[in-house]
Image (cartoon, rainbow, N blue to C red):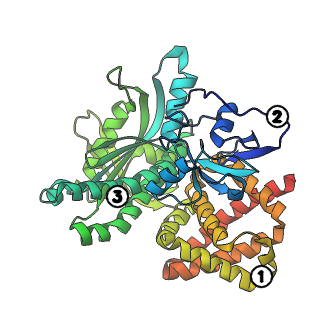
Amino acid sequence: MFAESKGLSKQGADAVHCVTYSHGTTIQAADGQTLLEASIQNRIPHHHQCGGQARCTTCRVRILDGLTHVSARTPLEERVASERGWDEFTRLACQTRVHGDLVARRLLQSPQDIVVLDLDELGAPSGVEERELEVAVLFCDIRNFTSQTEKSLPYDVVYFLNGHFAAAAEVVLNNNGFIDKYIGDGLLAIFGIRGERPAVACRNAVRAAIAMQDAAQRLSPMFERDLNISLRLGIGVHFGPVILGRIGHPGKRPITVIGNTVNVASRIERMTKQLNSSILLSDSIVAELPGALRVGASHKLQLKGMSEDSVLYHCDGFTNPDPALLVQSSFHRIAPRLVAFGERFYRILFEANPELRPLFKSDLALQRRMLVSMLSSLVKGLNRITEIEGGVRALGTRHCHYGAISTDYDKVANALLLTLAEFLGDEFTPEIRAAWIAVYGTISELMMAGAEVE
């Protein structure tokens, strides 16, 4: 719900604080104003389905920096947080009052939200809801799902599907994708709905396909052990025109895409089993990424229901290492041990650089949790760097206030690389190390740029 909210706090002579959202927008909030009130007052789309009464969780945010600058949880928020097992960084914006500068990320914000906002508030030409776009379409399906699950208990199958879809959906969203729908054990995702260049949309789709397969390989051993179900995927990717709009009964018309491009992508996915391929790309995808892909054998064939031949390619990855993909993939491997990772990072940092310890005036346990939260958010946003740029710059500004200087970033980089090497072991290859260095360089440059503003 994006409707105006009544009863907002009034701006007066009291202190005014800066709230920076991770997509880059900085707004002002009066001391004691709730985050939700500040968002609405500054025309930031912020879900609040219950009207800001703590009866839902749609306004929730993640505090990336400045946790000590917000109010303690109200009893209403404490109940919600306790029921859902939230850590201290996840807050209800309607219950969280601002008492200092901070950086936050709205959690109920995805490409889906942006599409809905575009259609509902911005409107298509001439007030028509439908739009014609050129997009990359990804179809993903589980191999041998029916035969594997026919004797499984229904709730076990639900658990299996939810585990798979949670991992696959995160990959889609992290790559600027839009999850159109879930179809049984299949998933349909769209890339390019936000005006990206065709090459960018296609690269995001291919990166998502590779990351999905990587996630499936991580999850499959657990599912095989616990449920006797293996998770093997077939993925087809195609690029072309679609119609994006609301389809269905007037009372329930979800955002979706239709067109021959969607049908072709579905047919390509069906060919993965026949051609013994985990990822098949159409020639239109390959044409948009000349020289960027490692492709195997090509197949010229007629897809079912199509009048013309199609050329399909086995996808073996990118020609050159993709830093974002390598960083996100390796980060997922240490995700179950993030608390220990944070502890080890600070131990390495302070042992090598004891002069940095006085800069961390807050409780170190809290600082470790903030590091883990911040690192997780940054890694997830690597393919949406323009969206998180403002938040990263604001982090740099705040670190400048703490007393950090430019040379400290190299010390942090060394500690980070040493910690990654310990936790990843043999998987910390030269390519992954180079990817982390490149990504850290981009993040640190943005933070130092934020510090220079001061």
Which residue was labeled with disc 1? 353
Task: Tell me if residue 207 comes above or below residue 38 in the rendering.
Answer: below
* Mark with earlier residue (3, 1): 3
Q: Residue 379: x, y in percent?
A: 58, 60
The reply to whether discs 1 and 2 touch (Cβ–Cβ < 8 Å) is no
Which residue was labeled with disc 2? 12
* Mark with earlier residue (1, 2): 2
Q: Residue 247: x, y in percent?
A: 36, 25
Q: Residue at x 69, y 45 (%)?
A: 24
Q: Nearer the viewer, residue 191 or 358?
A: 358
Which residue of the protein is positioned furthest toward the top in this rendering? 126
The quadrant of the rendering that contains the C terminus is: bottom right
Q: Residue at x 22, y 64 (%)?
A: 229
Disc 1 to disc 2, C-alpha distance: 44 Å
Q: Residue at x 78, y 58 (%)?
A: 398
Which residue was labeled with disc 3? 163
Task: Characterize the local packing of mark 1: few (<14), some (14-19) or many (20 or more) Cα atoms within 10 angstroms.
Answer: some
What amino acid type should be assigned to the residue bearing mark 1? Asn
Q: Nearer the viewer, residue 109 or 280?
A: 109
Q: Nearer the viewer, residue 382 or 160?
A: 160
Q: Residue 38: x, y in percent?
A: 69, 37
Disc 3 to disc 1, C-alpha distance: 41 Å
The reply to whether discs 3 and 1 touch (Cβ–Cβ < 8 Å) is no
Which residue of the protein is positioned furthest toward the front in this rendering? 75
- The answer, for residue 390, to whether it is visible in the render is yes
Q: Residue 354: x, y in percent?
A: 78, 83
Dividing the picture into quadrants, the one containing residue 223 is: bottom left
- The answer, for residue 279, to whether it is visible in the render is no
What amino acid type should be assigned to the residue bearing mark 2? Gly
Q: Helix, strand, or loop for circle 2? A: loop
